[in-house]
């Protein structure tokens, strides 16, 4: 005989899960014990929302679904921001929550509400674990979480059922799901369009990553000399120091002013796993009517941000290879000078001007950090600038909330990634207001003894919103800090190494030391007000 929670833990282990994140509560203590007994380490965060981003970080590092654990009532509600983010960002998460038994809830109301009613609209599925179907429900949850498109699945575990004995049963595993390669008469037309195009261009996004199609996309770009623009999530599909890689697009008006005119020179644009949820509103049908659009996607287009001449829901990588089947390798394409010019313009637009500020800070960090560094960044003006300056040399090495744009996610994402893959250098970039939201998890960073470098942009302002206020002709309201938070003293109170940074030389010296340290380092970088003006 095995208990319910032991069965849950065993199935999660089979899925490759090695850690779970959350905050304990009386309703989930039995579950946490079973996870630990099965070899899944439970990591306590200081807030369920941050714990969710830690679980996401572990997914990006390991490929196994992230696991988030919350207790009844307020614990469940605390993670709503993260769950919506996971839904929009295609992150497979198993959200395990404790719940009061139905018979108890009929007359007992303290901290009790309908978890499933709250979570159904913002998850792929929500299940209440029931007697004699535990294996099927947990397997179903994992399958749904990992299937296209990946996303969060909620499991509500009644208190009395958690420790209940379950009879051993034979449960057949689900067969591997095989997606198809695009085909048919329309696909044959699309193949000829690609074969005959003079200046084809690829725009790629997050679906390439979760289908694991990076190599096929890079292969086609290299083979046919195709330039590629990615969303922020797609950065690094081709190493961004390659002449064909035109960097990430999404929220930067400055980048759009260069990339959009360049796109109008194409006669064919191939959208590869591209989800425009990451993009500014000016990416709604941004192409001239005479440019043909072919779309290879994992999900049907229901967003209507753009429309294509041909749209194929298919296995993205093999379908792109098949699309290029009839194009000769020596077919005329973009002139080398065209690509050199746009690359140079982008570089010049976001180059630091040898003055201390956010651009120089980011450029110096990228120069000094190893090529295989994984960076995380939370939301703010610094994220838009960093997404243009920080080069990714492989995919999935810049983690951020680019669909929901959540503040305070950089530190927990870094913790989750580094915990799951301690050999990879990890650097987190946070705004001062974003870090203030998650200061408690400096204790998590301390307790886990993770050698993460945390860079804080300190300007005592919600800089991005302040810029928007000024653009509207408004006075500053609700965007300025009355005083400056002493991040160094706070970090030192958590027994972390911390330094104030006031110039590039100090940054380089401190970063070099941090790279050789066995513990976390916080670098509080003082930048002036309005540092982002004209930069993003």
Image (cartoon, rainbow, N blue to C red):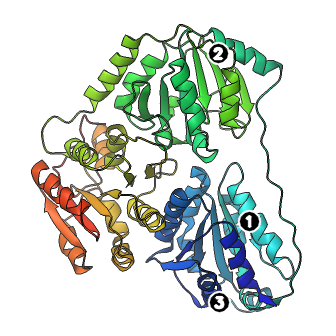
Nearest the viewer among 85 and 476 is 85
Local secondary structure at mark 2: helix
The residue pinned by badge 1 equals: 141
* Residue at numbered disc 2: 194
Disc 3 target residue: 30
| C-alpha gap between disc 1 and disc 3 | 20 Å
Residue 321, image x, y percentages: 66, 27
Q: Quadrant of the N terminus?
A: bottom right
Mark 3 Cα within 10 Å, few/some/many (few <14, many 20+)?
Answer: some
**Helix, strand, or loop for circle 1?**
helix
Picture coordinates of residue 453, whole percent (x, y)? 29, 62
Question: Count of labels shown?
Answer: 3
Reading the chain from its start, which is encountered first: label 1 or label 3?
Answer: 3
**For residue 455, which quarter of the picture?**
bottom left
What residue is drawn where x is 77% and y is 17%? 188
Residue drawn at x 70%, y 30% as measured from the top left:
319
The answer to which quarter of the image holds residue 169 is bottom right
CA–CA distance in space, label 3 to label 2: 57 Å
Q: Position of residue 161 (x, y in %)?
A: 77, 88
């Amino acid at each position: 005989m095995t208990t319910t929670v032991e069965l849950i833990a065993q199935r999660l282990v089979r899925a490759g899960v090695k850690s779970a994140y959350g905050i304990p509560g009386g309703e989930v203590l039995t579950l946490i014990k079973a996870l630990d007994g099965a070899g899944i380490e439970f990591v306590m965060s200081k807030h369920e929302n941050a714990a969710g981003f830690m679980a996401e970080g572990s997914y990006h590092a390991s490929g196994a679904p992230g696991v988030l654990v919350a207790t009844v009532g307020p614990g469940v509600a605390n993670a709503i921001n993260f769950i919506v983010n996971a839904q929009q960002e295609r992150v497979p998460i198993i959200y395990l929550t404790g719940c009061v038994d139905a018979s108890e809830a009929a007359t007992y109301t303290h901290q009790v509400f309908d978890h499933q009613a709250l979570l159904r609209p913002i998850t792929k599925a929500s299940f209440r674990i029931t007697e004699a179907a535990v294996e099927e429900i947990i397997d179903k949850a994992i399958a749904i979480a990992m299937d296209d498109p990946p996303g969060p699945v909620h499991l509500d575990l009644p208190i009395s059922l958690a420790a209940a004995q379950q009879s051993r049963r034979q449960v057949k595993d689900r067969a591997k799901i095989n997606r198809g390669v695009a085909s048919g008469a329309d696909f044959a037309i699309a193949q000829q369009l690609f074969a005959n195009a003079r200046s084809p261009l690829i725009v790629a996004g997050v679906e390439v990553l979760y289908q694991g199609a990076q190599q096929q996309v890079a292969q086609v770009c290299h083979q046919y000399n195709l330039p590629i623009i990615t969303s922020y999530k797609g950065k690094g599909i081709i190493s961004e120091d390659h002449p064909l890689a035109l960097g990430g697009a999404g929220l930067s008006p400055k980048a759009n002013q260069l990339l959009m005119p360049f796109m109008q020179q194409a006669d064919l644009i191939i959208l590869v796993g591209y989800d425009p949820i990451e993009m500014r509103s000016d990416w709604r049908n941004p192409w001239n009517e005479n440019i043909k659009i072919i779309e290879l996607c994992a999900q049907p287009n229901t967003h209507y941000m753009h429309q294509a001449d041909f749209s194929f829901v298919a296995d993205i990588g093999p379908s792109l290879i098949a699309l290029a089947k009839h194009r000769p390798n020596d077919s005329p394409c973009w002139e080398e000078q065209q690509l050199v010019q746009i690359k140079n313009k982008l570089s010049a637009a976001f180059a630091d001007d040898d003055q201390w500020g956010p651009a120089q800070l980011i450029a110096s960090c990228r120069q000094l950090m190893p090529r295989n560094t994984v960076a995380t960044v939370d939301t703010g003006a610094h994220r838009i600038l960093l997404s243009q300056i920080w080069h990714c040399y492989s995919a999935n090495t810049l983690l951020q909330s680019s669909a929901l744009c959540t503040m305070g996610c950089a530190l927990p994402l870094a913790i989750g990634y580094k915990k799951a893959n301690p050999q990879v250098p990890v650097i987190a970039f946070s705004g001062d207001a974003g870090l203030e939201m998650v200061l408690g998890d400096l204790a998590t960073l301390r307790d886990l003894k993770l050698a993460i470098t945390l860079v804080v942009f300190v300007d005592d302002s919600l800089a991005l919103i302040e810029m928007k206020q000024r653009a509207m002709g408004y006075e500053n309201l609700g965007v300025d800090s009355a005083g400056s938070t002493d991040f160094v003293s706070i970090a030192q109170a958590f027994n972390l190494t911390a330094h104030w940074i006031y110039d590039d030389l100090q940054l380089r010296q401190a970063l070099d030391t941090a790279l050789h340290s066995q513990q976390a380092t916080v670098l509080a970088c003082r930048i002036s007000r309005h540092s982002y003006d004209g930069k993003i």
